[in-house]
Structure formats: C-alpha cells, structure tokens
Image: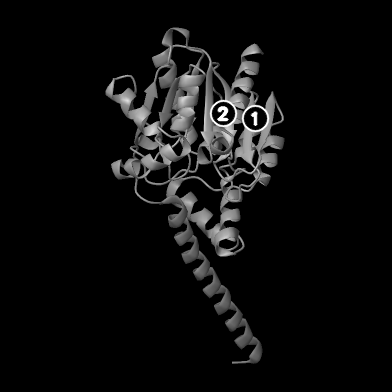
C-alpha cells in the first residue's frame, strides 16, 4: 500500500469512527433530553414540596378545594392519541369571573408545581383556571417530552375544553419555561377569537438553541456532531426536529398581545433568549419585564408583588384594546 492510499484509508477510518461516535452520542443525548424521569403519581408527590416552596400553603389550598369538589380533574385524548390530564377550578367569585387562564408548566414539572400562578389568577384576579399536565409529565400519557412543539396542539385542545366549561370570551395562556415555549409556539397558530393574550415566562427561542446552550453549559461541547445527530434521531423517532420547534418562528406570526418575562440571572434558559423572542414578535402589542436577580423560573418567587402587578396591568390593557 502506498503512503497516499494509507493516509486516505486512515482519514476515512477516522471520519467513520467520528461519525459512529457522533451517532451514538446523539442517540444518548436524545434519550437524555426527551426521556427524563418517569411521570405518574410518584412524580406528583415528588413535586408537592416544590409547589409550597414557591408559594407557602399551595398544597393545602389545592387539597382543600379538591376535597370540597371545587377543583376537578379531567382527561381528553390529546395529540397522537395519548390520554392527557388537567385540573380546572372556577374563579373565586364565579358570577363575576374576569376570564379564564390556561397555566402551562415547565420541563419535568407537572400541573402541581405552578399552583402559585393558579392561585394568582383565581384568588387575586378572579379568573377561572385550567392547568394541564403536558405529555410525558404528571398524570398524562406520552412517549417523550415534546419540548412545547407538539404540546401546543394539546394546549389548543385544552383551551377549547376550558371555553366549553366556563363559557367566557377572554382567555390568557400563561406558561413558564417549557410551558412558555409552548405558549409562544402556540401563539403563531390559527386560534379562536376568545384566546386574547399570552404571558411567557423564561421560555427558550427554539429547542435547538436551548439544547445548544445546555450542551455547552453541561458538557462543554459544540453542537456538531452530537446535537446534529440527536436532531436526526428525534426527527426519525418522533416526527419533529429541534430547529422546527422554534418559538421565534411562531412569534413572527403572532398578532395577539404578549407579555415577555425573564430573570436576568437565568443561566439555564439564557437571558439572551428574552430579547430574541421579543424581537421575533413583529406584529401586535407586546411588553417586556426583566426580573432583577431572578434565576430560572424564579421571577414570581423573587418578586411576587411586582410579578402580580405586571401581569394584572397587562391583562387590563389587553381588555381595554
């Protein structure tokens, strides 16, 4: 074998080995990111303390309303045929309800975790509230965490369910983290007129951008070849891609009002995503609030009174439009 042929053979072997390694690492990353700890009753119990840490007394509030038959469970058949679960509760004064809120939780959380938002809407704003478990979370079925992309289709179904239950014509969708991405991704779809406003709290610009940041933060690795390979695995296995699942692309089509919230100390969903998302929405009314010193999904816990005031003022503005 000549030296030239030997070098070509060696180069091909190295490239092949790198491709194989990248494919295996991509499959691992896809499983790592989209198949987190199992959901179910144990998952609900795991997060009860988290709900109380974000707003003391939340679990007792939930349990008392459920025992009284005021707070109820329901299930529907969601996207791709999976059974999905949600809870719903009427406004504190149903006869004078101001609207309906859909509260959407984050990655590896469930309907229980963001009871602080459910309580804010129900007890302080006098809104009806429906708060679902996204697929593969809480009491919902599912074969992977959908990172908001397919979740938006389930939330659109839940919006119709809530409208049929509460019969009002002012609805806000409010999501945190992956729930915020779900909210933004939903905002670009064709939606019924009663969905009037959106609040996104620390959502990512796209699944690709989020995983790229996480890969760098956690493993100190570039996106190629691992993220590229994981993206291919996801597309082949589940039918969607990380780049397709873009909050920014959906926001570009959104014409309805949106409030953008992000803590400036957030290093999980990079703070830079706030401006990326805000700039992507070029149609309709929008507001931005930077929560000083707040880490990821901690803006309410850090500034509960201002958070409440900002959301309330935003909704009042939207109603007056």
Is residue 146 visible from the viewing direction of this image? Answer: yes
Which residue is nearer to you in this view: 295 or 128? 295
The spot of residue 215 in percent (x, y) is 56, 59
* Number of numbered discs on residues: 2
**Is disc 2 surrounded by few (<14), some (14 to 19) or many (20+) residues within 10 Å?**
some
Image position of 10 (left or right of 148) = right
Is residue 136 visible from the viewing direction of this image? Answer: no
Q: Residue at x 59, y 41 (%)?
A: 246
Which residue is nearer to you in this view: 126 or 30? 126
Give the vertical position of 204 relative to 306 (above or below). Answer: below
Give the vertical position of 115 relative to 99 (above or below). Answer: below
Q: Quadrant of the N terminus?
A: bottom right
Q: Which residue is mark 2?
A: 189
Q: Residue at x 53, y 29 (%)?
A: 174
Which residue is nearer to you in this view: 152 or 312? 312
Q: Earlier in the sequence, mark 1 or mark 2?
A: 2
The spot of residue 290 in percent (x, y) is 67, 37
In 3D space, how far apart are the residues under numbered discs 1 and 2 (Cα atoms)?
Answer: 8 Å
Residue located farthest toward the top when viewing the structure as drawn:
95
Q: Residue at x 52, y 26 (%)?
A: 173
Q: Residue at x 35, y 30 (%)?
A: 60
Q: Are marks 1 and 2 in contact (CB under 8 Å)?
A: yes
Looking at the rendered structure, the secondary structure element under dot 2 is: loop
Q: Which mark is residue 253?
A: 1
Looking at the rendered structure, the secondary structure element under dot 1 is: loop
């Amino acid at each position: 074998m000549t030296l030239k042929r030997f070098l070509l053979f060696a180069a091909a072997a190295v490239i092949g080995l790198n491709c194989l390694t990248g494919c295996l690492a991509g499959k691992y990353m896809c499983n790592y990111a989209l198949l987190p700890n199992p959901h179910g009753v144990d998952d609900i119990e795991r997060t009860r303390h988290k709900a109380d840490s974000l707003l003391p007394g939340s679990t007792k509030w939930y349990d008392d309303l459920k025992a009284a038959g005021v707070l109820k469970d329901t299930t529907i058949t969601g996207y791709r045929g999976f059974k999905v679960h949600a809870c719903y509760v009427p406004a504190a004064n149903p006869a004078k309800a101001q609207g309906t809120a859909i509260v959407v939780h984050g990655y590896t959380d469930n309907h229980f975790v963001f009871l602080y938002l459910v309580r804010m809407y129900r007890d302080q704003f006098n809104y009806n509230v429906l708060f679902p478990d996204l697929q593969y979370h809480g009491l919902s079925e599912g074969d992977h965490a959908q990172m908001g992309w397919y979740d938006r289709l389930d939330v659109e179904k839940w919006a119709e369910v809530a409208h049929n239950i509460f019969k009002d014509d002012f609805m806000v969708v409010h999501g945190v983290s992956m729930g915020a991405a779900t909210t933004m991704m939903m905002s670009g779809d064709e939606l019924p007129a009663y969905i009037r406003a959106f609040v996104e709290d620390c959502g990512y610009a796209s699944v690709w951008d989020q995983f790229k940041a996480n890969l760098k933060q956690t493993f100190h690795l570039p996106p190629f070849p691992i993220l590229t390979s994981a993206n291919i695995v996801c597309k082949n296995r589940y039918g969607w891609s990380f780049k397709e699942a873009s909050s920014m692309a959906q926001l570009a089509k959104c014409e309805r009002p949106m409030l953008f919230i992000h803590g400036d100390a957030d290093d999980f969903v990079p703070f830079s995503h706030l401006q990326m998302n805000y700039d992507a929405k070029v149609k309709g009314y929008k507001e931005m609030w930077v929560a000083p010193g707040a880490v990821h999904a901690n803006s309410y816990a850090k500034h509960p009174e201002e958070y409440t005031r900002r959301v309330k003022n935003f909704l009042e503005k939207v109603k007056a439009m």
